[in-house]
Amino acid sequence: MLKQLRIKNFKGWMDTGTIRMAPITLFLGANSSGKSSIGQFLMMLKQTVESSDRKAVFYPGGKNSAVQLGSYQEMVFHRDPANKIYFEYRWLLTDALKFKDPVSGQAYSGNELAFTAAVGLGDKDQHTLVLDELKYELVEGENMQLSLGMQRKSDTKSDYKVEITNYSLKRKQGRVWYPGAPVRFYGFPDEVVAYHQNADFVQALNLRNEKLFRSLCYLGPLRTKAERLYSWTGIEPESVGYAGENTVAAILAARTRKISLGYKRSTKPFEEIIAIKLKEMSLIEEFKVDPISEQRQEYEVKVRTKGSKDWVDLPDVGFGISQVLPVLVQCFYAPAGSIILMEQPEIHLHPNAQSALADVMIDVINSRENGTERNIQLIIETHSEHFLRRLQRRIAEDVVSQEKVSAYFANISKTPATLEPLQIDIFGNIQNWPTNFFGDEMGDITEQAKAAIKKRMQKSTEPETFE
């Protein structure tokens, strides 16, 4: 689970500042305010980790990628190639990282890792991305156990030096050497291990970073429209897909799973959990996925809406249901320890359903499977006042703790734009509510009242007419 994030010189952000990442982290703001860029950056790092090209510092994406960011000049702040993209993040490890120095015998252990890196164009070659530096810190509680990184030598592309604190690397006998360039944006090259007697643990650092981004999944704001028939060959998809295209396959693959919505709450079959949540949002009464025949691998989604006795196909009900179904399925389908990044999960929903969706998200972070917490983290970009208001209410009611919700507002009234934390107290109040955060509601009410008074005065002064 991510605990902190900071990005500098990426797209519209000169500096996001340190972002506190909670189990539910919200990004709000006007259109084109830059809030989507934060998710795009995380997805670019994920794409890079999963890229087959070990030499590519960043993989900005291709035709079928979640994000396509183009060239470095297109993604760097002010499109200035002289700027370097700097980023740092800190995350909680699902299991502690432990190892022993084979030379000194000293043991090391940490439950968190912090990572920083700086990327830019080469000093001479203005077309190739170069990793200027990277650094890991192993943290136990609030105490740094050790730090290890690589720093690029000036005026070179592939010569780096290793820098380490609280640990002594012992070089094997042989010639003086310089390690090669790091792997992608985060990885120590094999030479670091090969030329030292006690550097095997750096491979664990590489793997933990890869594991972090493999736990990240993304659902975009435009989900695929509902179909009348869905094919499923029995394959278990990794997620519902960037546009929810694997939603029904995920439901079918998860039929044997049982989910609890909290400690000491009863477990229910996966499909029943989805149906319950849709009903709580007042979208349907019942929901089911059935094969059209035993001989075919095709399925139909049937729903029964409130006040109706008839079962109908998914395309025959409101569009909002087909748009929120991938959201619900992804939230409960994702493996334990997943980080789910979503854009506008509330899109096409009625305000009441938007409010209820916030309650679903609380259930998601509290959910359990096989007797253990799922530890799901939700990173949500939203425009919904109703979604936020419900979270504020639940904080005041102690349904969800203040620490489990983090909200940020992209403020474009300043130049450069700033990412401002919303200060939510234990009563659910936002202490620094931005001006016209969700529009000028009071302004509209005032102007409506003025117009009504003016219209009444005009009518009272009009002369009566007699026929």
Image (spheres, rainbow, N blue to C red):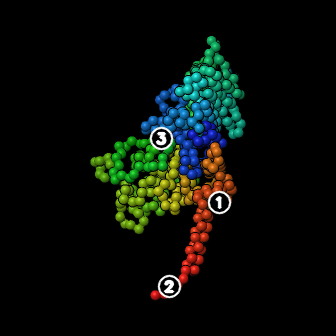
Above or below, 359 relative to 60: below
Three-letter code for the amino acid on which mark 2 is drawn: Thr
Residue occupying image coordinates x 61% and y 27%: 132
Q: Earlier in the sequence, mark 2 or mark 3?
A: 3
In depth, the one of 107 and 330 nearer the eye is 330
Residue 452, percent from left and from top: 57, 73
Gap between marks 2 and 3 measured at Cα: 68 Å
Gap between marks 3 and 1 measured at Cα: 37 Å
- Answer left or right for 238 relative to 163: left
Residue receiving disc 2 = 465
Residue farthest left in this picture:
295
Residue receiving disc 1 = 396
Residue receiving disc 3 = 66
Three-letter code for the amino acid on which mark 3 is drawn: Ala
Residue occupying image coordinates x 55% and y 28%: 129
Residue farthest bottom in this picture:
467
Residue occupying image coordinates x 51% and y 48%: 343
Q: Earlier in the sequence, mark 1 or mark 2?
A: 1
Residue occupying image coordinates x 58% and y 57%: 438
Q: Secondary structure beneath disc 3? A: loop
Within-10-Å neighbours for mark 1: few <14, some 14–19, many 20+: some
In depth, the one of 206 and 184 nearer the eye is 184
Front of the two marks 3 and 1:
3
In depth, the one of 74 and 214 nearer the eye is 74
On-image quarter of the N terminus: top right
Residue 145, percent from left and from top: 69, 32
Above or below, 7 relative to 160: below
